Image: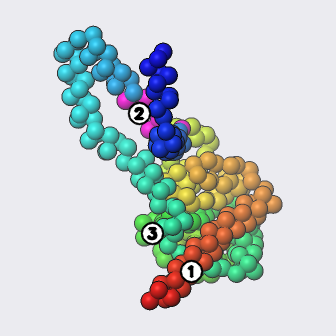
Amino acid sequence: MEYFKGLFLNIGLRDLIDMTIVAFAFYKIYTLVKETRAEQLIKGIIVLLVATKMSEWLRLFTTHWILQKTMTVGVIALLIVFQPELRRALEYIGRSRFFTKSFIEIKEEDITNVIEEIVEASASLSRQKIGGLIVFERETGLGEVVETGSVINGTVSSGLLINIFIPNTPLHDGAVIIRDDRIRAAGCVLPLSESMNINKELGTRHRAALGISEKSDALAIVVSEETGAISIADRGKLSRYVDIKTLRQILQNMYSSNTKKKQGLLLRWRNKNEKDRSDG
């Protein structure tokens, strides 16, 4: 009892900061792996660690030796098995506004026009029961995905979006990638979600939308070819049967959030440049 009392009395401010940082890091790691296959793998690793320690305490030398060697080799295996999760974690860190690569400012009226064009296209596809998949690139670059399709680099318009997804046309099966107020590419191939919890009724488009939202911070709109229902995939979650009013609000929130981040970064970049000139 005296030992613990002395331990608590010796904890200083620096120790509290240290523990807070570690706790925050573990919390962030947990949120990254939660409801992914990594969660089950981590549970398995914890069991192995406990078994290794127990075998040491019980002096089960052969078992302890085998478990120790397994853990040593397991470090390399973890890097391979956890590759998607590690990439996701590094992308999460890289999405800090200090690493944002775009300095584009979009006028408010242009944002409104873009949103209305996308909403109109989604509503039209939904009415005609034409399948569609529109992905919005945010801070995580989708250059690799763009390379799988045909580069367009055109202005966002409902007519263009509808024509892209008309059945039996060259680009109708893939995804459209939009960044800011431009259509970057069409006919793009997206990674499919590996989640086992996806409704069996959902097809490849929905799995692709979930896949890209799991591996990046992109938001995806899906229009079902069978029912005409509109769905939204964002951060690994799928919201189904989204109405037009909700869709418009989601897009407004997304563009508003992106604009605020870019304006803050642009202001900081300008201030830095002005300071460098004054120092020079």
**Mark 1 and mark 3: span between their CA atoms?**
30 Å
Residue 73, percent from left and from top: 23, 35
Q: Is residue 125 above or below residue 106?
A: above
Q: Which residue is mark 3?
A: 143
- The residue range painted magenta reads 35-45
Whole-percent x, y for residue 82 in the image? 38, 43
Q: Which residue is label 2 attached to?
A: 41
Q: Residue at x 48, y 15 (%)?
A: 1
Point out the image quarter for the C terminus. bottom left
Residue with the most extreme right position: 245
Q: Name the residue carrying label 1.
A: 271
Q: Secondary structure at mark 2?
A: helix
Horizontal and vertical percent position of residue 169: 56, 71
Horizontal and vertical percent for residue 256? 70, 68
Gap in angstroms between the C-alphas marked 2 and 1: 46 Å
Q: Amino acid at mark 2?
A: Leu
Q: Mark 1 touching mark 3, by CB under 8 A?
A: no
> Is label 1 or label 3 in front?
1
Horizontal side of residue 84 vs 77, given as left or right: right
| Up/down of 226 relative to 148, above or below | above
Q: In whole angstroms, how far apart are the C-alphas of marks 2 and 3?
A: 30 Å
Mark 3, Cα crowd under 10 Å, few <14 / some 14-19 / many 20+, is few
Q: Is residue 40 magenta?
A: yes
